[in-house]
Amino acid sequence: MTSETGDRSVYETIFRRRDTRGEFTGEPIPAEVLRRVLSAAHAAPSVGLSQPWDFVVVSDMDLRKKFREHVLDERAVFEGRLDAERARIFAPIKIEGIVDSSVGIVVGYDPSRGAPAVLGRHAIADAGLYSVCLAIQNLWLAATAEGLGVGWVSFYREEFLRELVGLPENIRPVAWLCVGPVRELPNVPDLERHGWRERLPLDAVLHYEKYSPAELS
Ligand SMILES: Cc1cc2nc3c(=O)[nH]c(=O)nc-3n(C[C@H](O)[C@H](O)[C@H](O)COP(=O)(O)O)c2cc1C
């Protein structure tokens, strides 16, 4: 499995991963597969072993339709802030696959878990949130290894999503993930394909010893 070059399957999965919106087939995810993917999320590192995440699996189509309406409203809010050229590029970009995917997974952040003495969070409150994002990345990579697509949706107001899925006040919704079988995982990110933005070369963000500013847009 490993050699001097490392475990190739991990790299393959990392580079194959894609944010998916238009490729979902809507087929069901076998229960054991969904369980494996969620187990991978739950195996993430977390500050002070606080494991501050919760996962709400949403299959109910009425809930999903309500969420989608809200997301489309927020899309319009964002679109309204763009200049004419950006709006033209943005128009054909799909930003969600909420009803086309097989399930939605809402990921929540519970800062009270393991508190007050969360080891490693006393100086950096965001360390809890970082932990949740690592769980999401684990989920994303595991789903990719299972041949599933994942699309992260963040066009929403936290309060709306909290109420929609009944999260208590102390739990912050961090993501709605659209998850399910896909026709394909595209090679190129949608945003690049549409000319919205390109992935930067590694050297543009890599520094040695001290940060050196680069010309980035
Ligand atoms: C925190 C976060 C929020 C995102 N929100 C959205 C979103 O609301 N809609 C969307 O279409 N993509 C969303 N994405 C996906 C990014 O657009 C995508 O990761 C990026 O374009 C790179 O493409 P790739 O993930 O396929 O490599 C989000 C990604 C992250 C990490």
Image (spheres, helix red, strand yellow):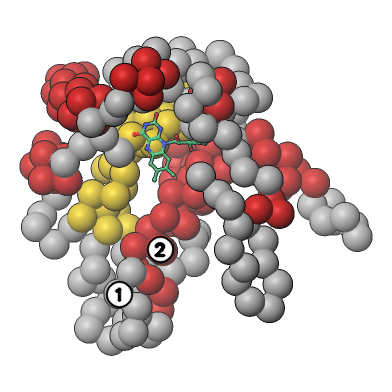
Q: Is mark 2 within 8 Å of ligand 1?
A: no
Decide if residue 52 is in sight here: yes
Q: CA distance from mark 1 to mark 2?
A: 9 Å
Quick one: 84 or 155, which is closer to the camera? 84
Quick one: 135 or 59, which is closer to the camera? 135
Q: Residue 53 at what x, y percent from top left? A: 32, 58
Q: Residue 21 at what x, y percent from top left? A: 43, 22
Question: In terms of image quadrants, where is residue 46?
Answer: bottom left
In the image, taking residue 34 as reference, residue 118 lies left or right, namely left
Disc 1 crowd, CA 10 A, few/some/many (<14, 14-19, 20+): few
Decide if residue 75 is in sight here: no
Element on which disc 2 rests: helix
Quick one: 69 or 7, which is closer to the camera? 69
In the image, taking residue 13 as reference, residue 43 lies left or right, namely left
Instruction: Report if the CB atoms under discs 1 and 2 are less than 8 Å apart.
Output: no
Q: What is the three-letter code of the residue carrying label 1?
A: Ala
Q: Residue 168 at what x, y percent from top left? A: 10, 55
Question: In terms of image quadrants, where is residue 97?
Answer: top left
Disc 2 crowd, CA 10 A, few/some/many (<14, 14-19, 20+): some
- Give the residue at x 73% y 46%: 11
Question: In terms of image quadrants, where is residue 111?
Answer: bottom left
Give the answer, above or below, for where 119 lies relative to 106: below
Q: What is the three-letter code of the residue carrying label 2?
A: Tyr
Give the answer, above or below, for where 63 lies relative to 175: above
In the image, taking residue 35 as reference, residue 111 lies left or right, namely left
- Give the residue at x 23% y 49%: 173
Residue named by callout 1:
125
Residue named by callout 2:
130
